Amino acid sequence: MTTPTLLILPGDGIGPEVMAEVRKIIAWFGDKRGMAFDVSEDLVGGAAYDAHGVPLTDATMEKAQEADAVLLGAVGGPKYDVLDFSVKPERGLLRLRKEMDLFANLRPAQCFDALADFSSLKRDIVAGLDIMIVRELTSGSYFGEPRGIFEEGNERVGINTQRYTESEIDRVARAAFELARRRGNKVCSMEKANVMESGILWREVVTQVHQADYADVELSHMYADNGAMQLVRAPKQFDVILTDNLFGDILSDCAAMLTGSLGMLPSASLGAPMENGRPKALYEPVHGSAPDIAGEGKANPCACILSFAMALRYSFDQGGEATRLEQAVESVLAAGVRTGDLMQSGDGNPASTTEMGDAVIEALNASL
Ligand code: NAD
């Protein structure tokens, strides 16, 4: 079997700092678990602009298309705010998502027991929470035509169109069912079939895909507004939530905050399977480049480390090793190691980015 390839794009701000910790973790899995990766590193965002005048070169794009998984840190920063829109750091990330056709965005909301008091909800509602939102990412209201602001009579009208084809719904539904099989085997699909035709079609196609190929997975349907309420009322009832681009944007942010800090949130975006059966995939923390703390060794590397855990599970079929890494993070938190973002004022000295990474390595060693 050929060695799986991993393209690392640290990016800007705290991106390189958190990625340095992930590189240690990757090396650990190579040394201690015999899991070799062919790792290469390249530039994206402001770092690529500084070197090449564009936020992503064609050569890097080509490498990303060929990699078994891409792991990205973060892009952006105040230095680049004055740039033309076409070369802003964020355009590099958008190009990756678009050209790799990453239609399924996976946002887990996992609440580590040690951080349950950080949630705005009561501890017993969120402790042990582990849900996954699968959001359709390349169609729906943010892309549908017609769109624009038009003259109508003596006033203007703003128009966006919610539009989904059967094949677009079919492929993201399959992604959700596949994921559910590797987790709690339950999918709840959310739309507004009560008031939107696109929602009626969504529900029909999801049901067809389920009956044809995934009858072993438990499927339920919920109106998205009720879904939002249920996420806050009793989030642990869910395993995988499947939803469209617009509702997913809102529901995933809502679910993310159930768990506490931005520094803990990983994500994945998956596309169609490649020739070797692995999906095209980009893994990245939800947070940005945090210019306010960049270069100070204060960043929490856990979101990026947990993004690599997602890569182990969803690109490399190493669910057991992914769990090992997640449990290592959990045990570090349980032992009281905290970066500044996980502390209240007066809580004592925060761990640095490197200390947090080292603590995870120690916990991994202890897991053997
Ligand atoms: P941000 O996520 O960078 O920071 C928000 C706040 O959270 C800051 O106070 C920051 O210090 C803190 N924070 C974020 N990640 C942290 C971590 N790992 N550890 C500790 N604290 C952390 O969002 P922002 O300030 O709105 O944006 C800053 C820059 O990042 C902008 O240029 C923005 O465009 C870019 N951005 C990039 C991405 C991405 O690369 N995917 C996402 C969001 C924002």
Image: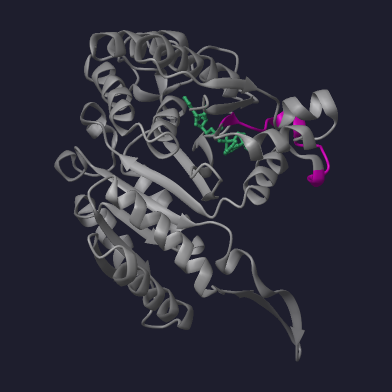
Residue placed most toward the observer, 154 or 248: 248
Which residue lies at the image location 41% right of the left edge and 74% below the top edge? 205
Which residue lies at the image location 44% right of the left edge and 21% below the top edge? 300
Residue 251 visible in the snapshot = no
Q: Residue furthest left?
A: 124
Q: Quadrant of ligand 1?
A: top right
> Is 216 on the left or on the right of 339, as rendered?
left
Residue 56: x percent and y percent? Answer: 75, 35
Figure check: 221 above or below 300: below
Quarter where residue 81 is shown: top right
Figure check: 280 above or below 1: below
Residue 3 visible in the snapshot = yes
Residue 161: x percent and y percent? Answer: 60, 75
> Is 231 on the left or on the right of 305, as rendered?
left
Which residue lies at the image location 28% right of the left edge and 38% below the top edge? 119
Residue 42: x percent and y percent? Answer: 68, 24
Residue 8 among those drawn in magenta? no
Q: Residue furthest bottom?
A: 153
Q: Which residues are magenta?
A: 71-86
Quarter where residue 6 is shown: top right
Residue 63: x percent and y percent? Answer: 68, 33
Which residue lies at the image location 59% right of the left edge and 31% below the top edge? 74
- Which of the image's four quarters has the C terminus? top left
